[in-house]
Amino acid sequence: MKTVNMHYPKLRTPLKKILNKTKDKMRAEKTLNKYQEFIAQFVSSQADVSEKACIENTRFTKVLNLTADDFYAYEVFSIAKSQGITSKTAFEQLYKEKLTDS
């Protein structure tokens, strides 16, 4: 018998709305780290980018969430190739240094 839920139906809906608005606001205020910013230009979904670049989705997500140190160079190259940009451009975007052709 669920009498508790029946006593407070009007309170539950507004509380859910408040919590959802708070979560949405927190998401909107979140700043992207350099890896997330780099991937954002390609993303229809993170899974699509990781799949096209042949990077395991778990590892890909860990780098984006900063729980893994960095993309490996070959991963940056794979992402660049799969997204139609040069590897030079990809490395410059990630590491904010202009690379010279040598």
Image: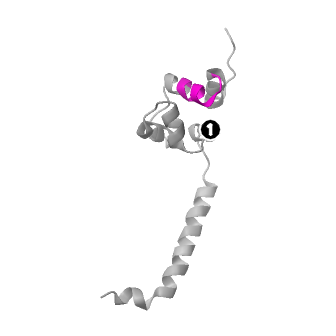
Q: Main secondary structure of the magenta part?
A: helix
Q: Is residue 28 above or below residue 38?
A: below
Q: Nearer the viewer, residue 89 or 54?
A: 54
In the image, farthest residue toward the top: 102
Q: Nearer the viewer, residue 88 or 67?
A: 88
Question: Where does residue 30 sit, x and y in percent of width and height?
Answer: 60, 53
Which corner quadrant holds the C terminus? top right
Which quadrant of the view contains residue 34?
top right
In the image, farthest residue toward the left: 1
Q: Is residue 28 above or below residue 6?
A: above
Q: Residue at x 49, y 31 (%)?
A: 70
Which quadrant of the view contains residue 38?
top right
Residue span colored magenta:
77-86
Q: Nearer the viewer, residue 17 or 33?
A: 17
Question: Where does residue 49 sit, x and y in percent of width and height?
Answer: 54, 37
- Neighbor class of circle 1 (other Cα within 10 Å; few <14, some 14-19, many 20+) is some
Which quadrant of the view contains residue 90?
top right
In this rendering, position of residue 25 left or right of residue 46: right
Q: Is residue 78 above or below residue 31?
A: above
Question: Where does residue 19 sit, x and y in percent of width and height?
Answer: 53, 70
Q: Secondary structure at mark 1?
A: loop
Q: What amino acid type is highlighted by mark number 1? A: Phe
Identify the residue position indicated by label 1 in the image.
42
Question: Where does residue 98 sit, x and y in percent of width and height?
Answer: 70, 22
Question: Does 19 lie within the magenta span?
Answer: no
Q: Residue at x 50, y 42 (%)?
A: 47
Q: Nearer the viewer, residue 1 or 38?
A: 1
Counting labels gives 1
